[in-house]
Image (spheres, helix red, strand yellow):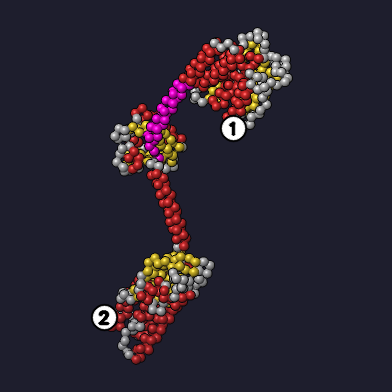
Amino acid sequence: MLRFTARLSKKPGFADYLLAAGLVVLAVVIRAAFDLITPGAGPFVLLFPALVIGGVFFGTGPAAAAAAAGGVVSAVLVLGQPLLTWPPFNAAQLDLLLFVPACAIVLWATASLRRAASLAAAAEARLVEVFRQIPGAAAILEAPDGRLLLRSAQSDSVLGHAAGRVRQSGDLDTYGGIHDDGQPYAADDYPIVRALKTGEIVRGEKLLYRRADRLVDLEVHAGPVRDLNGTVVAAVGMAFDVSERLAAERQLQESEARQRAVAERLHAAIDAGSLGLWEVDLATQRVRLDATFAAMLGLPAESVEMPRAELQRFVQPGDRARAAAVLDQAIAEGGIYCDELHMRTEQRAERWFVTRGRVLTDMQQVVGVVSDLTERRQREDALRAALEAREVLMREADHRIKNSLQMVVSLLSLQRTRVADPDAKHALGAAISRVEAIANAHLALQRSPDLRSIEIDRMLADLCDRVGSLNPAVTLCCEARVELSMDADQAIPLGLLASEVLTNALRHAYAPGVAGAVTLTTCAAGGMLEMTIADAGAGMPATPVRRGLGTTLIAALARQIGATVDTRSGPGAGTTVCVRLKLPAATGAPPGPVSDTIAAKPA
């Protein structure tokens, strides 16, 4: 059909004129032969078929030229008389006159036929080209034997076969279709063959296909082509490689499944944490609250949307300006938003909320979560009140302890005045000094802000002021300049230890009535506190004497706080006692072992 229509639409050439002329010559010769057999036949009866054939196959121009020449020859040779006589016309002359308009009509008809054929050829060529450009494997099989009429240009690349391998439907059994059970397709299993033989219409059938290089997933469509009587005359089939699409769909499904799982876990975590969700549309300044947040505000437990200004009415009046400024600053900076809000619910109940969010600049949104911390704030307030009450009680207890210790000192002092034995007086005096040292430590503890730590320099200065009256002839100089706070568990034993050493120095370093000096200094370096008590008195005897209660007490106190006590003394050379203590706050480690290098004079 395409070759025929292409011949009709071809522009006439010189050869076409010769062929048309030859056709007319043949018609004239046959007419002359007919004249011998059947005289009286029309002289132009055979020129009209020649004119039609020439006009259809060789063109209107060649047919017209040949018909004109043939008409003249027929008129001269066949009629054998003048072309026109007047009057009247005879039958032959009338045939000649009618020949010209008849030729015009025939040539117009052939020209119209050629134009229609040309248009049909162009349309058919376009359809064929469109079919060939289908982005997949496409084919047309002709009934009844399944001969391949047409295939698309992409068939080879999709199916991976060389052109010309399939000439009819029976050749399809060499292709690579695979059933679900792994069996290969027979020729009649393919959708296009089913459409050709049974008239079945196939839409989107999935087909696993084995190419020479790999397995691909095909999506197949097929359908019959019927004539006016409904008889199947052909079948059209198309197959598209959807491997990448199916892989993308599988990845998308897996991604959606992961996202759903993440969303479910997120919602479970949000529900478990009693968190509400909110978001602010910066373009419209509208706020969307989820059901949980709405319920927190005393609204119906469903998602609500309201202007941002409407949400502000839930914030306590005194907190509105600050809360709006915090959110506006986060929006301007495009970062994290965090705030605590004192709000009032729809039922006028006061609640505390903590909210955190992030500004999504690209999406013009702020999204975040909110949780109700009212109960936590109430617990914190109750705990704070309890701590304050405890602190008051602790200070009251320390005050009572200090008063009790002062009463003990008064009683011991009263008892000392009534005792005549010098040893008893000395023992009561030592007891009074120790009780006063404990009272002084408790006084320093009472002055501390947290009732746990004591300022060492202040405690030692107060201690020096108190014990300095034991020997008015001796000057006690306190040079405690280390501004350091120490836990009471270490500070109190350190103060008692310093009291024992100072008491010994004031009573025994110098003879009664002899002027002298005792110096207390402190320094801190390398995570160690060093306290030195030195005098320039008589010193200790070369031969150690027995341990007294004071020496035993000093050793016990040093062992308690993990300190080392180093005593350097000699006859007439004075005495220096150096106490070294590791500071846990500086070293982060518990105190080290105690050095038992204590050689003190008897108490």
What amino acid is found at the position of numbered circle 2 in the picture?
Pro
Residue 104 placed where, x, y %?
33, 74
Which residue in the rendered view is the most extreme toward the left?
88
Residue 590 shows which numbered tag? 1
- Disc on res. 338: none
The mark that comes first in sequence, 2 or 1, is 2
Q: Is residue 443 above or below residue 124?
A: above
Q: In the current view of this chain or complex, which residue is farthest to the top?
A: 513
Query: What secondary structure is marked by label 2?
Result: loop
* Residue depicted at 30% across the width and 35% down the height: 346
Q: Judging from the image, what secondary structure is the residue with disc 1 in? A: loop
In reply to whether residue 89 is colored magenta, the answer given is no
Residue shown at 62% from the left, 17% from the top: 502
Residue 88: mark: 2
Q: Which residues are magenta?
A: 369-398
Residue 86 placed where, x, y %? Answer: 28, 79
> Residue at left 31%, top 37%?
298
User: In the image shown, does 17 or 157 lie closer to the viewer?
Assistant: 157
Q: Which secondary structure dominates the residues rendered in magenta?
A: helix
| Residue sitting nearer the eye, 485 or 190 | 485
| Placement of the N terminus among the 4 image quadrants | bottom left
Residue extending furthest toward the bottom:
37
- Image point (33%, 74%), residue name: 227
